[in-house]
Amino acid sequence: MSTPSRRDFVAHAGSCAAHLALAAVGLPLAARAAWARPLGTVVAREPFGTLERVADGVWALISTPLAGDRTTLCNGGLIAGRDGVLAVEGFFQPAGAQWLAARARELTGRYPTHVVLTHFHADHANGVAGYLADGAHPVVRATERTQALVRERNTPADPSREAALRDAVALSAAEPTRLDLGGRVVRLVPRDGHTPSDVSLELDDPDVVFTGDLVWNAMFPNYVDATPTRLARAVRALPRGRATVYVPGHGAVARAADVDRYVAMIEEVERGARAAHARGQTAAEGAAAFSLPASLGNWALFSPAFFERAFAAWYKEL
């Protein structure tokens, strides 16, 4: 298993990985502290992130890559039942998956028996082979579209990653897959919008949702592969109207109010993009004049180019 070089990393210029690389430059200390503020009980901490117990048998790995450690980059976590342990995400480097697998054994007595990739982006999928270290053989699950996009678009090519996906189980793209871990059922719900193939992981008891990159908490999202109308529809389908813990793709663990604020933010982006389009402005011109209202609070915006990327995604639909 190879560690990506800086050149490999930069090659992901359109991916969430590069989006987060820019985040490490010039972000105020207060914003960094908010990113890392735990909602649950921290059971492990590394330079690349913290593992928080957010419910009985459920842990969220909240990545904190702003200091430059690219081991994980995205959030993920563990869900444990009597008969199995599910690991969420493959992370950017195999070392991230290996680390989470080791924490699973410490916390539950076993390595992950299942792994789910929420979508194809490099920071969520490129390290999946780390789960196959030490002779482990978890069942990797992802939609067929996600598996194809990992193979087609994620670089550099990696035989160990290909081997990890060779026997992957395809999740339905039409209806939720029910995964029983023994006294704990996880629904793997097919969605799209951030990419052509996203998956959320949803539990009713305890009430926890892993959103993948459909939700970013207090951080402006990457629209590089987004279809904004579908993204909005998918995000609006996530809130449950009851106390729920949401583990976003990036940013701190969220509550319902955080998700509501995210919905309001992407609605504001839609209004701005539609208005600029109606005025005949280019995406760049419209984005240059756009700002989020103060009423939505602070959103980490690391470059005005991210507004332009969002407007460009809207313009493709308009």
Image (cartoon, grey):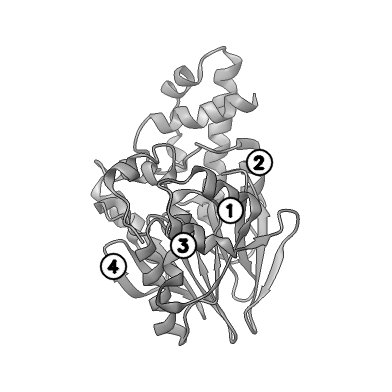
- Residue matched to label 4: 46
Mark 3 → mark 2, Cα distance in angstroms: 27 Å
- State which tag comes first along the sequence, 4 or 2: 4
- State which tag comes first along the sequence, 3 or 1: 3
Amino acid marked by disc 1: Gln
Q: Nearer the viewer, residue 243 or 26?
A: 26
Residue 29 located left or right of residue 266? left
Q: So how many labels did they put on this image? A: 4
Could you tell me which quadrant the N terminus lies in?
bottom left
SS type, badge 4:
strand
Amino acid marked by disc 4: Glu
- State which tag comes first along the sequence, 4 or 3: 4
Could you tell me which quadrant the C terminus lies in?
top right
Task: Single out the mark in the foreground, 2 or 1.
Answer: 1
Mark 4 → mark 3, Cα distance in angstroms: 19 Å
* Image position, residue 26 (x, y; %): 24, 41
| Above-or-below relation of 81 to 127 | below
Q: Which numbered tag is attached to residue 147?
A: 1
| Image-quadrant location for residue 141 | bottom right
- State which tag comes first along the sequence, 3 or 2: 3
- State which tag comes first along the sequence, 1 or 4: 4
Amino acid marked by disc 3: Val
* Image position, residue 27 (x, y; %): 27, 44
Amino acid marked by disc 2: Arg
Q: Which numbered tag is attached to residue 128?
A: 3
SS type, badge 1:
helix
